[in-house]
Amino acid sequence: MVSFPNAKINLGLNIVGKRADDYHNLESCFYSVPWQDALEILPSEKFQLTFSGIEIPGKHNDNLCVRVYTSLAKEFKLPPVQIHLHKNIPIGAGLGGGSSDAAFTIKTLNKLFRLNLSDETMEEYVKPLGSDCAFFINNKPVFAYDKGDRFEEININLRGKILVIIYPGIHISTKEAYNGIKPQRSAISIKEILLMDKRRWKDQLKNDFEMELFKIYPELDVIKNTLYQLGAFYASMSGSGSAIYGLFENEAIVSSVFSGSFPPEYKVMSAIL
């Protein structure tokens, strides 16, 4: 059985407080985008995990797909499977690729073995693996809060807009991203800003990770400003970076993004949402 775990972008990201468990409370809007991995899970005589595409660091047993399978296999006495993950979503880019892989693993196993798990049950299974894992179970726009693992429905629609994501090949760990953060609640909530005219997002909708990370990696600031120069109505770093995305109204404008605006070693993805 084959599925295609997708990425997400953050429309705004405010770090609003430090928690007693050393995590942070945040506010953000998660929005699914069509940059995809490919995940295949098949019954097998013995458990196997194989990869292709982008190299995935770490031990196999630490991979989120394996951890999901191991948890379900123990509870439901599942037979062995062969998992193959073709990795296409950049790692350490703030696009949620690993979290999506975990969520799609449980959704695929649920269908393959007819476990009849509800969406709510699957969300609870994957929440401990990463704060945004549960988002990918339903894959619909949400206002995320607390650790980023509690959701409210939000009426935001970017259908027909043109998305361009630039990945400069910089891996930013979550620990590095939080090093310079000073939690502070924004004067205007992300929910309020997203209801505004989209032309006001440029001045109102912020990602708190940008301030410090742009000092360390000034090329990220250059990418963001270039997207605005090319006509984006909104541009931002996604999550804790390093991917920077731009939203455009006109597909014709976007063609200029591929005409030498960025170094050839950067990875560029575009799509109509």
Image (cartoon, rainbow, N blue to C red):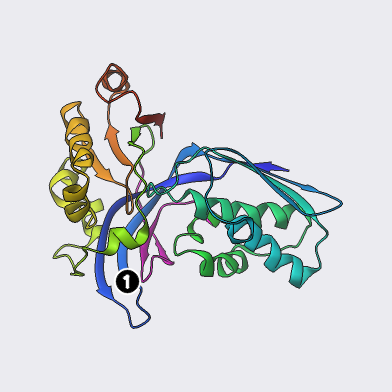
- Residue 205 horizontal side relative to residue 130, left or right: left
9 lies left or right of 136? left
Quadrant where the C terminus is found in the figure: top left
Question: Label 1: few (<14), some or many (≥20) within 10 Å?
Answer: some
The answer to which image quadrant residue 149 occupies is bottom left
Residue 78, relative to residue 252: is it above or below?
A: below
Where residue 25 appears, as percent x and y from the top left, is 32, 71
Q: What residue sits 52% from the left and 38% below the top?
A: 54
Q: Quadrant of residue 106?
A: bottom right
Residue 215 seen by the camera: yes
Q: Find the magenta span and give its range.
A: 138-157
Report if residue 161 is visible in the image: no
Q: Position of residue 1 (x, y in %)?
A: 73, 43
Residue at image coords 59%, 61%: 62
Compared across the picture, whether 256 is left or right of 90 comes to: left
Going by the image, does 10 lie left or right of 49?
Answer: left
- Residues 126 and 152: in front is 126
Does the segment drawn in magenta span residue 164? no
Q: How many circles with numbers are drawn on the protein?
A: 1
Element type where label 1 sits in the image: strand
Amino acid bearing label 1: His
Residue denoted by label 1: 24
From the top left corner, tell me how far across and down residue 30 is, in percent.
38, 53
Residue drawn at x 32%, y 45% is 242
